[in-house]
Amino acid sequence: MKTTESMHDNRPPGFSLPLDRREFLKTVGVLGGGLFVYFTVGNRFAAAQMPSMNYPTDFNAYLRIAADGSVTCFTGKIDMGQGTITSLPQIAAEELKVAYESVSIIMGDTDLCPYDFGTVGSMNIRMFGPALRKAACEARGVLKELAAEKLGCSVDQLVAENGTVFDKDRPEKKVTYGELTRGKIIERHLKEIPPETPSEKFTIMGKPYLHQDARDKVTGRAQYTGDIRFPGMLYAAVLRPPAHGAVLKRLDVSGAKKIEGATVIQDDDLVAVLHALPDQAARALKKIEAEYEEPQTGTDSETIYDHLVKTVPEPNVVSQSGDIQEGRRLVKHIFEETYRSGYLAHTPIETHTAMAKVENGKVTVWSTTQNPFPLKTSLSETLKIDPENVRVITPFVGGGFGGKGAPNPNREALEAARLARITGKQIQVCFSRADEFFYDTFSPAAVVKVVSGIDEAGNVVLWDYTVYHAGDRNTDAIYNIPHLRIVSLGGWMRATPGAHPFGVGPWRAPGAHINGLARSMQFNLMAEKAGMDPLAFRLKHLKDERLKGALKAAADKLGWKPHAARSGRGWGIACGIDANSYVAHVGEVEVDKGSGKVRLKRIVCAIDMGLSVNPQGSRIQLEGAMTMGMGYALTEELKFKNGKIFDLNFDSYSIPRFSWLPKIDTVIVPNMNQPAQGGGEPGIVGVGAVIATGIYDATGAKLFRMPMTPERVKEALAKV
């Protein structure tokens, strides 16, 4: 099974807790024999990693060691391409002392895996990794105890290595893990979990491994939800409204019923055509006559920003120190700017897809979801059936970036399940590209207002920062500024009622891109006025040594040459803390002043993420994130009016292409003794900031709105 990522506690009301021991033993019967290790990790490490997640104290990570010595990991996380299908088995193999090749993993199956809140926020490794690592340590300890009993010696005499336990003084005296388990289920607890392997003794963790699913994906053997086929299955084409908030006034389905083999289903708000062939289902759907009353919200792609500033919840003071008014009195030069970003679509190459079947009172759904267990809860509530009678299986997922998780309820899965229960058939609902755009939970449009200032010595003494609707990610007070206030009004989580004309939600490192642009551009403006090199200006004010280290590493890789104020080279710079990782970006842009077109020539990302379990996987994630970041920075912006969305395919909504790619460099700052932190999202947060500050360094043009289209660049150039 496979995965993605994005943040915060997204569990819906009534979420289910992990299996209790009786229920889990039933699951063991399904899986067959082997050694299962049970242990309670609770708040000892899981909650300490992210207390807001509030993990239950009986949170369990599970391992199965079969009679042949092979190992299976089970996790409610999924893999959408970020590579935890590989790095999690690396963790298990390292601590179990088995060959990496002997470890497989089952992900996102609600009947086989322990409860998990979902795959979000670059949390797979930093949240589930410690649990799995503790499980593997305990498994190793249990196996050594069993070996001591079998070999008739003390545990202290024994060494576990390559799936075998042997006497360190008499290596021929040994027993394999498979011989110890004998295909039986053995439950045993340890009073103390053995210590984790120190980083200097790693043989598997910290080493580069090719992703387990790489060959299947590049050869086309990988099976996604849309590839699932059952005899007699039907494809569903579902009636969709023309705009968000549209109300159905008239419906005539008689034309669809005339299509041979078509079945029309009307179930409250769900109107669908079923057919054995997907194109015939779509053809029949076009025969339905539907009239809607469309809303008049008064907002569109341009007026939305004024609306957002006026439609806000109570302010949340993220950080505050000193006195803002005193800071205003101290400044010699003040900088007051407003930054904007539009709505962003997730645009996964695989659209939302679900297959559902009902058999013997049990509903099974194969889904492109990031959150199998919350989806199970939604299915149970929607169908009004016991959660025990609902199973969610997550096959390969072709990208998600937050769009296939909470708060998106996986509409297609609920529709497929409803239709399967009504008809008794296996039903597939696959979003068209237009459906994918229409029902996306977009990254919210946002506004940031910043007032900052430097004193006569060039020190930043004032930072008054207010962000509307993007949330507080990447707003951290990373600089030493005596008079500071950071305020957040609204975000993608629990969006302010009336603020947005359609659904919004997490989009890879939610809100971090606009906050990164505002902070970095503001610092470049101040650095120029202070007559300082932008890199030196940041290092002068940064508080954290790890962040300084990442910034220096990125600058060294680029070959940064200090320059007072603007250099004309088009060098951009950004840094921050994201997903608990310390990340810095530097790069070089080229601006065609005649056309306004911007080309990113080179970009470097340096990251201190603590333990990098699979450095190759980390690099791939950073490269992909930087590539994706070029989209929000240069072209991606949803066009809409009155709830009607005008971008419904890639002909008008332009995402990055391979021809855009710059030279990309990544630097993983070695820090293996620190806990593993996020790696899937930090690579994207500084891309827009690097491009904007690069444009400024090259031309003096100030870009305060993303995407930085040629038209906006030309407009900014005209003001220089």
Image (cartoon, rainbow, N blue to C red):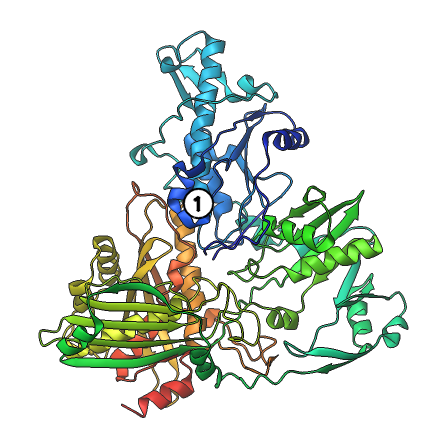
Q: Is residue 632 above or below residue 682?
A: below
| Image x and y of residue 38, in percent | 52, 28
Amino acid type of the residue that numbered disc 1 sits on in the rendered structure = Met
Q: In this view, does 687 lie above or below 593?
A: above
Question: Between residues 175 and 114, which one lies in front from this camera angle?
Answer: 114
* Residue under label 1: 127
Question: Between residues 659 and 655, which one lies in front from this camera angle?
Answer: 655
Which residue sits furthest left? 457
Question: Between residues 453 and 145, which one lies in front from this camera angle?
Answer: 453
Is 301 positioned to the left or the right of 364 in the image?
Answer: left
The answer to whether residue 616 is visible is: yes
| Image x and y of residue 432, in percent | 67, 69
| Image x and y of residue 573, in percent | 27, 69
Is 549 positioned to the left or the right of 581 in the image?
Answer: left
Is 480 positioned to the left or the right of 264 in the image?
Answer: left
| The quadrant where residue 614 appears | top left
| Image x and y of residue 100, in percent | 47, 35
Q: Is residue 345 above or below residue 303?
A: above
Which residue is painted at 32% across and 92% down in the image?
A: 718
Which residue sits furthest top? 152
Callout 1 secondary element: helix
The answer to whether residue 221 is visible is: no
Which residue is painted at 54% across and 60% down in the image?
A: 400
